Image (cartoon, rainbow, N blue to C red):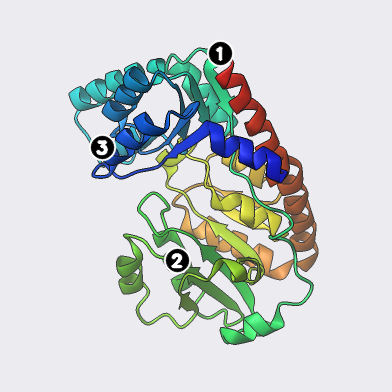
Amino acid sequence: MGTQKLSTLKRIVHLLSFTIAAAPIVFWQIIKEQPHVVIVIQPYFFTAPWIRLVSLFSKRKIWLHIQDYEIDTAFELGFLKFKWLRRFATLIESKLLSSVDRVSTVSNRMMERLILKGVHPEKTFFFPNWVDTQIIFPLENNAAFRQQWGLTAEHFVALYAGNMGVKQGLDLIIKAAHELIDQKQIVFIMCGEGAQRKQLLLEAQGLDNIKWIPLQPYEQLNQLLNLADVHLLPQRENAADLVMPSKLSGMLASGRPVLTTARRGTQLAEIVENAGLVVPPNQVDLFVEALLTLASDTEKRTLWGKQARTIAIQQWDKERILTQFEQGLLNCIEL
């Protein structure tokens, strides 16, 4: 996207991604600056009162972007349980969704859910997670970065890089590492932070086939992703089609195969089936079997890696997606 286009977007958009405590400050800033469009990014449910105030007082277009369905996820994963509370939260969510001018989300299945929630199709916009395929790309030689973490070309690296939260189901990786403790060439790399990291470290005590590395600077993200012989993408079963992991686009762009846990027929499964292996959630034995298959078949890994790279370029390339988004913004202004 050119400099002139970026300048235009800065004039017409005020991006909201705030904490509850900061909401009043951001609200008055919007009232003062009077942007053409206000984009609100989750947690949208808890910012709902402020969205309504912005809409009423600024008379500006409101664009709501949903990265994951936080209400559905909370109930499906058991964080919240009461049926009356779900009905109440769903009612508030419905009123919020109907009050904005545009609603976008990141996958086709999540788009379908918007319609089921009562959003008119003309108000929806497909805005998937994007990746800069000029910055994330396959490296022919990443030996120096491997050596930095005590890895050689003989090691088969199963990499998880991302948030370590509950909905990822990362305990599956620890269980797989226990099962594969005697496979000395297979090394698990866990990179990231999150609420579950301390618990995962406790579960992994005594395992010398897992390396825990800190978050890497953005300048080394491509080297990090190229550490992988396979990217690991576990997901809790009930999270399917409520989220589309943003980390997937970088995994694919790195030209490495992906091993994920998802039910057949979910969008995550349909994508990864062409770029690696999919096993059912919570099935440690099948997860281990898939890892052994990947570790033993260089030819398949190469094929799936090439297909992964093609998917990233064709579906999630930064320039294509942001150009479409820019046009969507301009259309929203003209409503």
Residue 106 in the figure: left or right of residue 85: right
Mark yes or no: residue 25 visible.
yes
Q: Nearer the viewer, residue 111 or 104?
A: 104
Between circles 2 and 1, the one closer to the viewer is: 1
Q: Counting other residues with Cα less than 10 Å from the Cα at mark 2, is it few (<14), some (14-19), or many (20 or more)?
A: some
Give me the residue at 80% from left, 64% from top: 299
Q: Counting other residues with Cα less than 10 Å from the Cα at mark 1, is it few (<14), some (14-19), or many (20 or more)?
A: few
Q: Which residue is mark 2?
A: 192
Could you tell which of marks 2 and 1 lies nearer the N-terminus? 2
Give me the residue at 26% from left, 41% from top: 20
Where disc 1 sits, the SS reads loop
Image quadrant in which the C terminus is located: top right
Q: Which residue is mark 1?
A: 335
Where disc 3 sits, the SS reads helix
Where disc 2 sits, the SS reads loop
State the image coordinates of residue 31 (x, y, percent, origin top left): 35, 29
Q: Nearer the viewer, residue 31 or 329?
A: 31
Could you tell which of marks 2 and 3 lies nearer the N-terminus? 3
Q: Residue 75 lies in what quarter of the image?
A: top left
Q: CA distance from mark 2 to mark 3?
A: 32 Å
Q: Which residue is mark 3?
A: 24
Three-letter amino acid code at the position of disc 3 = Pro
Three-letter amino acid code at the position of disc 1 = Leu
Q: CA distance from mark 1 to mark 3?
A: 27 Å
